[in-house]
Amino acid sequence: MADQEISEQVTALDGVLKQIEAVVNLPGLQTEIDDLEQRASAPDLWDDPESAQKVTSRLSFLQQEHRRITELRQRVEDLPIMLELAEAESDTGAHEEALRELKALQAEISDLEVRTLLSGEYDERDALVSIRSGAGGVDAADWAEMLLRMYSRYCERHGWPLEVYETSYAEEAGIKSATFAVKAPFAYGTLSVEQGTHRLVRISPFDNQGRRQTSFAEVEVIPVVEKTESIEIPDDELRVDVYRSSGPGGQGVNTTDSAVRLTHIPTGIVVSCQNERSQLQNKATAMAVLQAKLVERQRQEEQAKMDALKGESAGSWGNQMRSYVLHPYQMVKDLRTETETGNTAAVLDGEIDEFIEAGIRWRRQQATA
């Protein structure tokens, strides 16, 4: 790589980081950190455990973000010095090390730049994700379970806590549906671009004639709601069913009727929770999921009204958003961003960062347009 080209890349990197610093507003970030540190040191902090948890989690996240940006700034400023020293001493090894640092900085700053695009009203929140098998019979149920594993591995790679609230197993293989929460800052903003229909094409492992099968699964992503946003649900609009939790093949998970299913009669929305031993805990969790779905439904209705007033008639971009082909060739392709890869095994093992980053950038472009 020519020295001129390297110099231009370093300059471009510095410019992108300056834009990020301006968007993030480091002085404002530090002010919020100072305020949270003061609240965290209050002797009565843990009198309200829920509030204390929010304060400490937010403080930890902001401290990490501030440290990440300041460290990147120092590394960007050190990079030209590394290159100068390597050139002055004609040190090939040091020059290669500087180029590796340049490449690493480009990747990290690009990742941080994507984070700054998450500025939506709910983007900072935890996410509630539901996966439902669609057309395709037993293959679709198996595909839904493959997607559940893909997102579980993605969250595991990023160190994001994931809690499965409910899993409805299919009779032969796979799952009919699953609902889980991802509890991490910006989980909703990040994962919301995964909403839509995911299509799988492969040789069916359930077809004794080895025929190719196309199956579908739907992914829904909604933000976790705050208590102040909760919608009041009258008792006569809610049906509560309790049942015994079960796993694959009907194997008993516990011996009490602790699982809870809530049905909101006016909308027909049904949510279930079976991850806790206590019926009360499962009901509380299911109610939180129902509240989130109702708030999201209300938000979508309001957005639809606004779009109608503006004369917009664009369809949902989420439908048929990604195709996974395992036969006759190997390819995963996002139908919105045109992002694609032939490494299908890595994608199904949770390496979907490239698709999510492209989706976030695409969404911002659509909003700007």
Image (cartoon, helix red, strand yellow):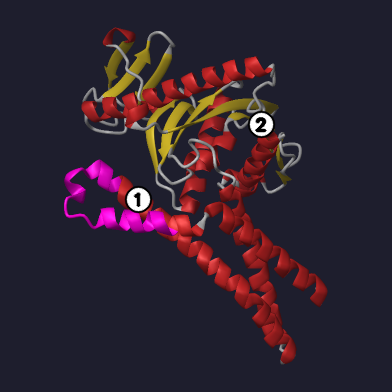
Q: Position of residue 301 (x, y in %)?
A: 53, 17
Residue type of the residue flagged with mark 2: Met
Report crowding for label 2: few under 14, some 14 to 19, many 20 or more residues within 10 A (C-alpha): many
Q: Is residue 214 magenta?
A: no
Instruction: Read off the magenta span.
Output: 30-53
Q: Which badge, 2 or 1, is on the more N-terminal residue?
A: 1
The quadrant of the picture occupied by the N terminus is bottom right
Task: Identify residue for label 1.
Answer: 57
Q: Position of residue 253 (x, y in %)?
A: 29, 31
Q: Position of residue 44 (x, y in %)?
A: 17, 50
Task: Identify residue for label 2.
Answer: 321
Q: Are marks 2 and 1 in contact (CB under 8 Å)?
A: no
Name the secondary structure under disc 1: helix
Q: Main secondary structure of the magenta part?
A: helix
Residue type of the residue flagged with mark 1: Ser
Q: Is residue 61 left or right of residue 146?
A: left
Give the residue at x 26% y 47%.
52
Q: Position of residue 259 (x, y in %)?
A: 29, 24
User: Could you tell me if residue 31 is visible in this image?
Assistant: yes
Q: Is residue 234 left or right of residue 328?
A: left
Name the secondary structure under disc 2: loop
Q: Nearer the viewer, residue 152 or 287?
A: 287
